[in-house]
Amino acid sequence: MCYNKKVINFSIDKCVSISHFKKWGLGGILLGKLSNSFQLFAAFFKIGAFTFGGGYAMVPLIEREAVEKHHWITDEDILNILAIAESTPGPISINSATFIGYKVAGFLGAAAATLGTALPSYLIISVLSLFIMQYKQIQWLAWMFDGIRAGVVVLVFNAVLKLGKKCPKTKFTIPLMVLAFIGAGLFNVDVVFLLILAGIAGVVRQLTVAKKAEGGEV
């Protein structure tokens, strides 16, 4: 599965359409999925290796790679995937990678994207654990990470702005966003609980609109 169906290229910068391999039978389909899985691994490995500050700091990079660069998913997809990733167990970055990978290349794609996201952190932490005591005493490294943490705030804020622009703005969604922000920011309400409530509110609203439409009121 791939949005750019005109390109057949095995470089990590291009998207390979599995439909082009169908004429080669099952082996061709598998080859297409392997190629896409390699692209997914490379893209998410890069995201995992150069992102500091946790899952939310990865959101703008995931959007750039998956939506703008490779066209694996659409702007609407990224909003839906982030909502699902936040409401399911596990880090949002890993969950998002798994969903995107599965959408592009099935199980192989999900495994490749997930491994690509997690592997850089595993390797870095494994190396740091060998000399963690010495690392604590290196002052310039502490200063460097102070600066990185400040940059992470900008990345997260940038993600909020970009996703906010793509979110539908109606008389229903705007009050819902404000209430969710107040609940999470001021009262520390669990995000999963807020997502569930927002989902229920959306269903109730649509059922109400449909009922009014059937009655000729809308």
Image (cartoon, rainbow, N blue to C red):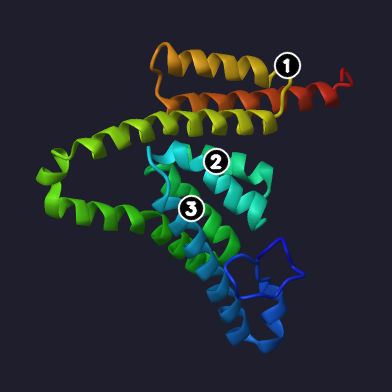
Q: Which mark is residue 97?
A: 3
Q: Earlier in the sequence, mark 2 or mark 1?
A: 2
Please tell me which residue is depicted at 60% across the width and 47% down the height of the picture: 64
Please tell me which residue is depicted at 74% across the width and 21% down the height of the picture: 170
Q: Identify which residue, 106 or 38, lies in the foreground.
A: 38
Question: Does 11 sit above or below residue 31?
Answer: above
Q: Please name the residue that numbered disc 2 is placed on.
A: 60
The type of residue carrying mark 3 is Ala
Residue 208, given in percent of the width and then of the height, sits at: 72, 22
Quarter occupied by the N terminus: bottom right
From the viewer's perspective, is 60 left or right of 213? left
Please tell me which residue is depicted at 68% across the width and 48% down the height of the picture: 74
Question: Does 209 sit above or below residue 108?
Answer: above
Which of the two discs, 3 and 1, sits closer to the camera? 3
SS for dot 2:
helix
Please tell me which residue is depicted at 48% across the width and 64% down the height of the picture: 42
Residue 43, given in percent of the width and then of the height, sits at: 51, 59
Q: For marks 3 and 2, give the CA distance.
A: 13 Å
Residue 24, given in percent of the width and then of the height, sits at: 67, 88
Q: Within 10 Å of the Cα at label 3, are there few (<14), some (14-19), or many (20+) other Cα atoms?
A: many
**Quarter holding residue 145:** top left
From the viewer's perspective, is 202 left or right of 4? left
Asked if residue 91 can be seen in this view, the reply is yes
Q: Within 10 Å of the Cα at label 2, are there few (<14), some (14-19), or many (20+) other Cα atoms?
A: many
Which of the two discs, 2 and 1, sits closer to the camera? 2
Q: Please name the residue that numbered disc 1 is placed on.
A: 171
Q: Identify which residue, 18 or 11, lies in the foreground.
A: 11
Q: Earlier in the sequence, mark 3 or mark 1?
A: 3
The type of residue carrying mark 2 is Pro
The type of residue carrying mark 1 is Lys
